[in-house]
């Protein structure tokens, strides 16, 4: 069994920066923030039924397992996450 897993810090940075990636345009409420993001709780309002594009592991299984090992994919997501945190701190 694989031990690699994306460990989300639940900071909301990915949900607050949708404008940085065209793939998320349908989720953007118009200001770069996801329409399902709850700013009071810093959580997704539809987490259990969120789109695949918002689920790191589902996206790996559906699309990215052809291009990356799970370890590489998790590392790429973690790097992206850290960059989004920095962007979010500057706001």
Image: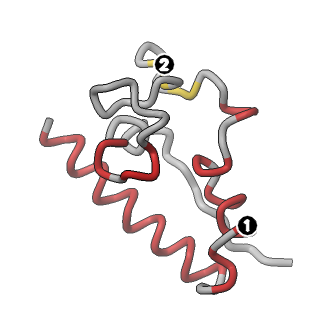
Residue depicted at x 39% and y 24%: 29
Q: Residue 38: x percent and y percent?
A: 48, 19
Residue at the limit of the structure toward the right, as seen here: 1
Which image quarter is the N terminus in? bottom right
The correct choice, above or below, for 43 with respect to 15 in the image is above
Q: Does label 2 or label 1 sit earlier along the sequence?
A: 2
Front position in the image: 76 or 2: 76
The residue located at (67%, 85%) in the rendering is 66
As drawn, the residue found furthest toward the top would be: 40
- Front residue of 17 and 40: 17
| Relative to 1, 43 lies left or right | left
Instruction: Name which quarter of the figure residue 40 lies in.
Output: top left
Query: Label 1 neighbourhood size at 10 Å, few (<14), some (14-19), many (20+)?
Result: few
Secondary structure type for disc 1: helix
**Pointer 2 residue:** 38
In three-dimensional space, the C-alpha distance between marks 2 and 1, rounded to whole angstroms, equals 27 Å
Label annotation for residue 19: none
Q: How is the image coloured?
A: secondary structure
Number of on-image labels: 2
Mark 2 Cα shell of 10 Å, populated few (<14), some (14-19), many (≥20): some
Verify CB contact (< 8 Å) between mark 2 and mark 1.
no
* Point 36% across, 30% down: residue: 33
For disc 1, the marked residue is 62
């Amino acid at each position: 069994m694989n031990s690699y897993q994306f460990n989300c810090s639940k900071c909301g940075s990915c949900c607050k920066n949708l404008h940085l990636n065209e793939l998320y345009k349908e989720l953007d409420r118009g200001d770069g923030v996801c329409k399902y993001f709850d700013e009071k709780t810093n959580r997704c309002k539809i987490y259990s039924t969120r789109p695949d594009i918002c689920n790191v592991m589902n996206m790996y299984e559906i699309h990215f397992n052809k291009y990356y090992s799970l370890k590489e994919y998790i590392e790429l997501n973690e790097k992206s996450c850290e960059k989004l945190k920095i962007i979010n701190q500057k706001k």
